[in-house]
Image: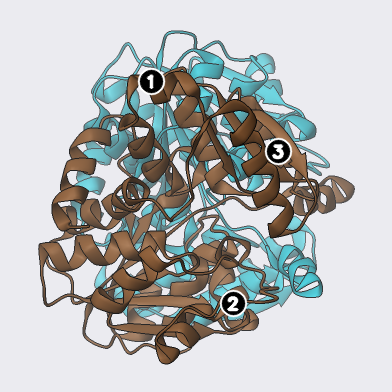
Chain colours: A cyan, B brown
Amino acid sequence: MSFQGIEEAYNRIAKVVNKTPVITSRTLNLLVKANIFFKCENFQRVGAFKFRGAYNALCLLSDRQKKMGVITHSSGNHAQAVALAASLWGINATIVMPKGAPINKINATKSYGAQVVFCDNTLEARIKTTEDLIKKHKAVLIHPYDNENIINGQGTAAYELIKEMGVLDVVIAPLGGGGLLSGTALASKGLHSNTKVIGVEPILADDALKSLKAGYIIPSTYPDTIADGLRTSLCERTFNIIRKYVDDVITVSEIEIIEAMKFLWERMKIIVEPSGAVPLAAILSKKVSVENEKVGVILSGGNVDVEPFFQLLEKKS
Amino acid sequence: MSFQGIEEAYNRIAKVVNKTPVITSRTLNLLVKANIFFKCENFQRVGAFKFRGAYNALCLLSDRQKKMGVITHSSGNHAQAVALAASLWGINATIVMPKGAPINKINATKSYGAQVVFCDNTLEARIKTTEDLIKKHKAVLIHPYDNENIINGQGTAAYELIKEMGVLDVVIAPLGGGGLLSGTALASKGLHSNTKVIGVEPILADDALKSLKAGYIIPSTYPDTIADGLRTSLCERTFNIIRKYVDDVITVSEIEIIEAMKFLWERMKIIVEPSGAVPLAAILSKKVSVENEKVGVILSGGNVDVEPFFQLLEKKS
């Protein structure tokens, strides 16, 4: 994997992905004495950076593979990303989703024309169901992060941010399976080798910190964090990139995540999902020091179920 | 009042107000077959366009007036706007707020260093308390919309939007006391006289529609709409501008307002308050026809109490 892969991915997908806005907050900058630039991937198509990777991966399939169709398992943003990317390419997509996935994500995935196959709520059931389907139908697996083309696509968010804002002292990204952080690190270090790259994960899903300390992968066992996008664990591919290119991994509590999310909603007026608020949680809790620095933050996505809020509102009105 | 006043206001305040982003939605554009550009004043300082007018008005006070200090009555965004503008000028500000105003708005107003004086929850009590204070302290009243400099300031949002996006077929703005719509109409017609200007108000606060039909002002009596920023009624000044420059006034129901707000939150990932969602309500309900048109929408603000949502979230986590 290399920086060149990200630059090529960017040129490949730039016309189809949204060039997402970069947003700042006077209040926050005064509060933490830094210049923080938020790359708003919550404004990306399907509401998350995942579309960058999925679209890049699908661009690179051979004609034969495109005819075979694609398959993936996901309860969240990757499902929608693959579904939309496949529909743009006119490719058949099968998405294995746990029965318990939120109804709005199931509906969104179906709305892009993907076939949704349900399975039990365990990771094992997802993998088993997906493998069985692959054996039967020979569809091409699009793994959410253990895939070079996916990682290159995800890296284009940081690439776009740095191309727009110039040299950054630090770039901070959420850390789950490590696809976004790997791409972010390759892009950031590739553009300016002195830029520090930091990954942030929930304490309740701190497999990366543990794995880095141990020197081998220790998957999360019960990653019951509110940051549902970060419950996945590293794979060898992302582990190796993160070991090599990421300067620091920091963990944050559930309360810190909620406080950061609230700041983004209340003060900055943007809907960000818990996973996307994790880097700001590290900043607000001063677990990462950013004073006097020019900081890039990848706001990974904004897919939150706002239904309960509107139910309250309708009751009141 | 004239277009020149808005251009001058823009040059006066451009360095202090936020140049707010313009956001689009592929989904929405496909849905209504139009090109809609949202001017995101929810990203303005204090979370609403009101800062534009307040800052412009305070710029134009004489030194003697600045020493006297300013006063206004408001339960909402104008209170915060005057408080912040006054603090930037180092002017004393007194804000008369009803006892029942939301605690977050009271705290925000105080946080800018304004003195908050509480009164009973009626409009009469607000006016009486303000007049009494003016008699005692000789402070300068900054009316939320019956003020030429305020209207010119509010018009800079549309001015900035059109300068960035080029000629628009239609510009749509929320309509309460008429300050924003008056400024929007002066700016839009001043830049391109063929641009259509439409105001949208809640059916539950439809004083403008009634007044325009009658030919004289008929204030709202019990404007119990969820769009709390639009409960005010026209004054002679705004009535006359709207009569002259606004092409159409449309009304929307409470359910249509909530649906539009939900679209902005769920699909576009931005926090917009009910008053700011009113123009989109008119578009989504097809009460205004925008097919094949290039449309500007003023998203007036994003000050919503999100606390109930986060209370639900904390319980779950």
Cα–Cα span, label 1 and label 3: 28 Å
Cα–Cα span, label 2 and label 1: 38 Å
**Quarter of the N terminus of chain B within the rendering:** bottom left
**Label 2 element class:** helix
Task: Please state the chain letter of the residue tagged with numbered disc 1 in the rendered image.
Answer: B
| Label ID, residue B143 | none
The residue nearer to you, when weighing B222 against A284, is B222
Q: Quadrant of residue B105?
A: top right
Tell me the residue at 33%/64% (across/down): B182
Residue under numbered circle 3: B106
**Quarter of the C terminus of chain B within the rendering:** top right
**Label 3 element class:** helix
Nearest to N terminus: mark 1 or mark 3: 1
Labels 1, 3: front one: 1
Q: Is residue B105 left or right of residue A152?
A: right
Cα–Cα span, label 2 and label 3: 24 Å
